[in-house]
Amino acid sequence: MSDEVQPGHVRIRLDLSYDGSEFSGWAKQAGGRRTVQGEVEDALR
């Protein structure tokens, strides 16, 4: 990954922690299972 950011783009860093008992892992999965990635992406839309 390059450290350069293209014009019109912003790079951010997000550190988080979570109780994973209600999730089916971090990465988005097929079948509509609730994942951390899916929740973060939905929240950022």
Image (cartoon, rainbow, N blue to C red):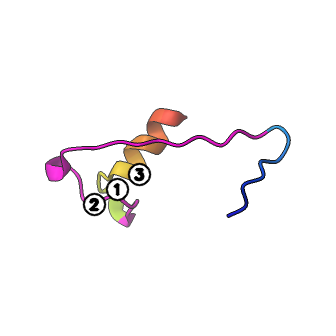
Residue 7, percent from left and from top: 85, 41
- Amino acid marked by disc 3: Gln
Q: For label 2, count other residues whose C-alpha is less than 10 Å away and answer few (under 14), some (14-19) or many (20+).
A: some
> What is the C-alpha distance between the residues marked 3 and 2?
9 Å
Cα gap from disc 2 to disc 1, whole angstroms: 12 Å
- The image quadrant of residue 33 is bottom left
**Residue that carries the numbered disc 3 in the rendered image:** 37
Give whichever of 8, 41 is nearer the camera: 8
- Residue 19: horizontal and vertical position, in percent? 18, 45
Residue 28 position, x and y percent, is 40, 59
**Counting residues from the N terminus, which is met first, the one under dot 2 or under dot 1?**
2
Residue type at mark 1? Gly
What is the CA distance from the residue labelled 3 to the residue labelled 1? 12 Å
Q: Position of residue 11 (x, y in %)?
A: 65, 43
The residue labelled by disc 1 is 32
SS of the residue at dot 2?
loop
Residue ID for mark 2 = 25
Secondary structure beneath label 1: helix
Query: Of label 3 and label 1, which has the lower sequence position?
Result: 1
Residue depicted at x 37% and y 63%: 29
Q: Which of marks 3 and 1 is in front?
A: 3
Q: If the image is split into quadrants, where does the N terminus sit?
A: bottom right
Instruction: State if disc 1 and disc 2 touch (CB < 8 Å).
Output: no
Q: Does 14 appear in magenta?
A: yes
Q: Furthest residue to the front?
A: 3
The magenta-colored residue range is 9-30
- Of 29 and 4, nearer the camera is 4
**Residue ID at (55%, 34%):** 45
